[in-house]
Image: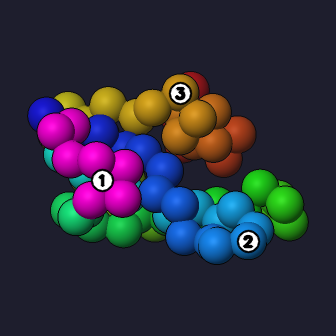
Amino acid sequence: MVKLRLKRCGRKQAVYRIVAIDVRSRREGRDLQKVGFYDPIKKQTYLNVPAILYFLERGAQPTETVQYILKKAEILT
């Protein structure tokens, strides 16, 4: 099963990538594809909408935080 989840990138300041990853992988494990970027401090998001829709159509489950980000960007209703 595939999930859309956050993967931490920043060392001092928290910056996250939104990735499609296998459920059995750890948070910092190898991802299938990077589908977005989220900076909670600057309130910036970049989303690769076609890639996100591709994974959602094939049954990927977003985590709560990613689901909130997608709803805010009006990708999920």
- Judge depth for marks 1 and 2 and give the one in front: 2
Relative image position of residue 2 (x, y in whole percent): 20, 40
Amino acid under label 3?
Answer: Glu
Amino acid under label 2?
Answer: Lys
- Tell me the CA gap for discs 3 and 2: 24 Å
Q: Which residue is mark 2?
A: 12
Q: Nearer the viewer, residue 49 or 32?
A: 32
Q: Which residue is mark 3?
A: 64
Q: Nearer the viewer, residue 12 or 42?
A: 12
Q: Where, by quadrant of the figure, is residue 15 drawn?
A: bottom right
- Judge depth for marks 3 and 2 and give the one in front: 2
- Tell me the CA gap for discs 3 and 1: 14 Å
Q: Residues within 10 Å of mark 3 (few under 14, many from 20)?
A: few
How many circles with numbers are drawn on the protein?
3
Q: Where, by quadrant of the figure, is residue 45 drawn?
A: bottom right
Q: Which residue is mark 1?
A: 20
Q: First in sequence: mark 1 or mark 2?
A: 2
Q: Residue at x 63, y 42 (%)?
A: 69
- Report helix, strand or loop for mark 1: strand
Q: Is residue 63 above or below residue 46?
A: above
Looking at the rendering, the stretch of residues picked out in magenta corresponds to 23-29
Residue 27 magenta? yes
Relative image position of residue 5 (x, y in whole percent): 42, 45
